[in-house]
Structure formats: C-alpha cells, structure tokens
Image: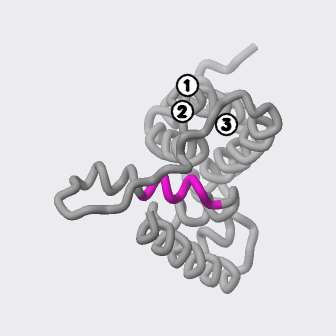
Amino acid sequence: MIDDKLTDQFLKLVEENKKLIFKVSRMFCSFEADRSDLFQEIVANLWKAYPRFNGRSKLSTWIYRVALNTAISWFRDYSNQKNHIEYTDWVPGIETGETLDEITELLYAAIGHLGKVDKAIIMLQLEGYSYDDISEIIGLSRTNVATKINRIKQKLKNHLSNN
C-alpha cells in the first residue's frame, strides 16, 4: 500500500522542482516529445528512489543526481535506437539585436553538441551550483570540475563564434 503522506510529499517535491527536471530534459533532448518522455522517466525514477532519500545531501543535489543519471541512461538507450533525425547540427551565429530567448536557444543548441558529462557540468554551473556541489553531484574532484568548466566554456565560445 502506498503511503498517502509520502505521495503528497513527493508530488509537492515534483511541483517545486519541475523547472529543474525540465532543464535536465531540455539539455539532453532536441525534440519536445523526447523531452516529455525523459521528464516522465526522471519523475518515475525519483518516485522509486524517494523512499531511500536520507537527507545527507541537499534535496536539489539529490534531484539533480537522479535526474542526470536517468538522462544519461535514457540518452544512451536513445542513441542506440537512432529513431530520430537530429537537426541541432545547424546553429546560426549570434547577431546583434537578437532577444535573450534567441540567444538562450543558441546556447542550448551549442550545449547540445557537448558530451553527456560536459552537458551535466555546464548545466549545473549555469544553475549557480558551486564547484564543490558540482563535484559532489557528478563524482569528480573539485579541481577536475574547475578544469572541465573552463574547457567547456571555451568549446561553447568557439562553437558560437564559428556558427
């Protein structure tokens, strides 16, 4: 039998963190239908893991860890299927006069060209997480995270200036 209190707590958790879950889905999926599928998969995995959350880390850190692990697994399975044509290979250059939304879309498209771990790291950094928090979530040393972030920023800068 499912505990109603646990269910209510979980539904509140999902509602309060749906933007975070959507950001992970958006980072890993180009198509809206895929984003929706991945979002649901993340929520399902959060539900399975929620009774085991022990509070040793921040709730948002735990959600990111589950979401990123789910996304990486989902992306690996998705890549093996190759059911969709990816159109994210074309990214227009940033031009003056573009709105913040347009620039954000260009940045997301550029991030789409990164590897799975790099996507996760830059997403956490853009979200404002400290190097220590990113290190804990991803499982790399703080120094490695700092080095990777600098390299990722350079890759994004090169990609955006060349396209």
Of the image marks 1 and 3, the number of the one nearer the N terminus: 1
Q: Are marks 1 and 3 in contact (CB under 8 Å)?
A: no
Q: How many marks?
A: 3
Per the model, the C-alpha gap separating discs 1 and 2 is 6 Å
**In screen coordinates, is 107 left or right of 33?**
left
Q: Nearer the viewer, residue 107 or 41?
A: 107
Q: Position of residue 18 (x, y in %)?
A: 47, 37
Quadrant, the C terminus: bottom left
Of the image marks 3 and 2, the number of the one nearer the N terminus: 2
Q: Is residue 3 above or below residue 154?
A: above
Q: Residue at x 75, y 13 (%)?
A: 1
**Was residue 113 drawn as part of the magenta stretch in this picture?**
yes
**Was residue 21 drawn as part of the magenta stretch in this picture?**
no
- Image: magenta residue range: 107-114
Q: Is residue 74 above or below residue 158?
A: above
Residue density around tag 1, few if under 14, some if 14–19, many if 20 or more, within 10 Å? few
Label 3: element kind: helix
Residue lying at the far top of the rendered structure: 1
Q: In the rendered image, which residue does mark 2 sit on? A: 31
Q: Residue at x 57, y 73 (%)?
A: 152
Q: In the rendered image, which residue does mark 1 sit on? A: 33
Type of secondary structure dominating the magenta stretch: helix
Q: Position of residue 111 (x, y in %)?
A: 53, 58
Label 2: element kind: loop
Q: Position of residue 89 (x, y in %)?
A: 55, 50
Q: Are marks 3 and 2 in contact (CB under 8 Å)?
A: no
Indicate the amino acid at tag 1.
Ala
Label 1: element kind: helix
Q: In the rendered image, which residue does mark 3 sit on? A: 46
Per the model, the C-alpha gap separating discs 3 and 2 is 22 Å
Residue density around tag 2, few if under 14, some if 14–19, many if 20 or more, within 10 Å? some
**In screen coordinates, is 104 left or right of 54?**
left
